[in-house]
Image: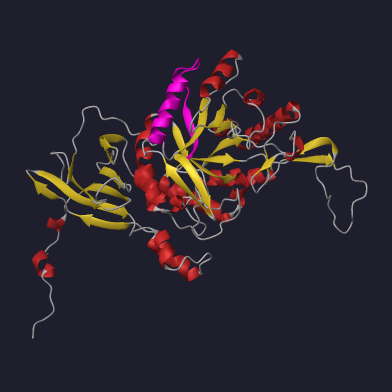
Amino acid sequence: MLEIELTHPQTPEPFPHNFNKVIGSGHLGLALYERTLRHLEMAHRELGVQYLRCHGLLSGSPDLCSWADQNQPHVNPELGFVKDQLVGQGKILHNFAFIDLIIDRLLDIGIRPFVEVGFMPRLLASSNHTLMRWDAYTSPPRDYKLWSELIDSLIRHWLKRYGLKEISQWYYEVWNEPNLDGFWPASMEEYYKLYDSTVRAIKAVNPELRVGGPSTAGRVDALIDPFLNYCHANKTPVDFVTSHSYAVQTGERKGEFAYHTLRPASFLAQRFGQMRKEIDNSPIPGLPLHITEYNSTTSTHGIIHDLPFNAAFLAQTLSEAGQHADSFSYWAVSDIFVEEGIAPAEFHGGFGMVNIHDIPKPTYHLFSFFNQLGNKVLSRDDRYLFTRRDDGHTLGVLWNPNDNARPSQRVEYRITLPPDTGPCVARTMLVDEQHANPYRTWELLGRERNPSRAQVELLRESSRPVCSYTAPSTEAGRPHLDVTLDKNAIILVDFIPVEDQTHGYHGLDKARYESLSLPGN
């Protein structure tokens, strides 16, 4: 049995809740779907999410640009619309109606935009290079003046609609992974030109607005140093740095699925720490670092995302990465996600922590557990984190990812509370292979690709963590609790202060009702 002895440190280390500040999603047009909004409501209410990284804002669906003059003198009256909307001339119209619907709804939920400024509207693109099922145009603009006019028009529209007090609390991140050919079929020097044009257009509306980049795929090289060197040399404004990272080492596609080998569970937090050092060693030190995408793997076909192992594997990241990153955004909130196609089965390895029928996966519960923690660290290890909350609760999360190098996957802990702990009860919430694992239930039910409504309810029922309440034992005047974690378990332990009011009940005889029995013959 492993001992965890909790004390009250004189100067407790803070535990910043940076893990749930931002969350990712598929392209922003999906937020027109009622299901996506439902999942965002869940994330705000139960996980404490404050911002949505608004992906693919300017390209695909909805597209923001159209020709005022379609240059089509002969329109088929039976069709009533122009066959090719890319044919036209004259003034380009900017249409923000659908974006207004989305942003309005996000703000109603309580979530603010972390704006990803991209991709390229079709009419502004320098080529027909597209990516993903929803046709994101990812080339540089054919005319930087037209691009700047679009950004100016959008930001001024938001200023008028929402006011400076609101939009100055948003973040504006220029593009997505420009160091990958698919997302930016041009050089990084061309990206710097795009960044410079974009940030200057935004700052011209109001210098208080926060703009950053380079939004790189940063698993190996985040390219933070050359980006900040460029900004410093060219006096280009930059308010924060963004990058991405995934813990995948190698990958293999087999039929419908992807299988990966992973880096150690410590990798992501360490990688964010390396990015932090890169910023602080640059000519512009001290800038905030926002990780706008991370996960265990990079594939929407990796069953790992549906399993308890994903939660147990990422727990160390949630515990430690906030020391380095001002936010780190899990990719993504929902399986309503169409980069390659719609969900081919109830569970298929989608990035979402909630599946298409609102069923929380184990990783969702990991975020829920961490959201309940306090902001003062009592004890931390690579397999647990205990904190103190201002309301007097002592709370911890423990995790046990499968490790084939161990002879046994079962781990037992004894948690001993500080000597001055008053009366309390321990509430535990458990997720593991046998509990709150809807993937396993779906598997046992036969892996129906599109289950019936009754089967969906069974899956939802099986997704709930197991809750129990226990009175801690006392030894040498100190209360303690023993907990057991099996393979891929995560558990929340909440020591709730208790003020016993039993003395106020007249005629209460506990022994009488605890000895209730069937009558004898």
Question: Within the magenta stretch, is there residue 286?
Answer: yes
Q: Quadrant of residue 226?
A: top right
| 342 and 301: which is toward the camera | 301
> Residue at position x 70%, y 43% from top?
63
| 206 and 192: which is toward the camera | 192
Residue 17 picture location, percent across and down: 38, 37
61 is higher (above) or lower (below) than 357: above
Whether residue 188 is visible here, answered yes or no, is: yes
Q: Quadrant of residue 153?
A: top right
Whether residue 368 is visible here, answered yes or no, is: no
Q: Which residues are magenta?
A: 267-294
310 is higher (above) or lower (below) than 78: above
> Residue at position x 31%, y 31% from top?
14
Residue 254 picture location, percent across and down: 52, 53
Quadrant housing the C terminus: bottom left
Residue 8 picture location, percent across and down: 20, 33
Residue 342 picture location, percent across and down: 59, 55
Residue that sits furthest to the right in the current view: 73
| 234 and 131: which is toward the camera | 131
Residue that sits furthest to the bottom in the current view: 521
> Residue at position x 42%, y 50% from top?
364
466 is higher (above) or lower (below) than 366: below
Q: Is residue 411 left or right of residue 297?
A: left
> What's the image's color scheme?
secondary structure
| 152 and 342: which is toward the camera | 342
303 is higher (above) or lower (below) than 279: below
Question: Within the magenta stretch, is there residue 457?
Answer: no
* Numbered circles on residues, count: 0
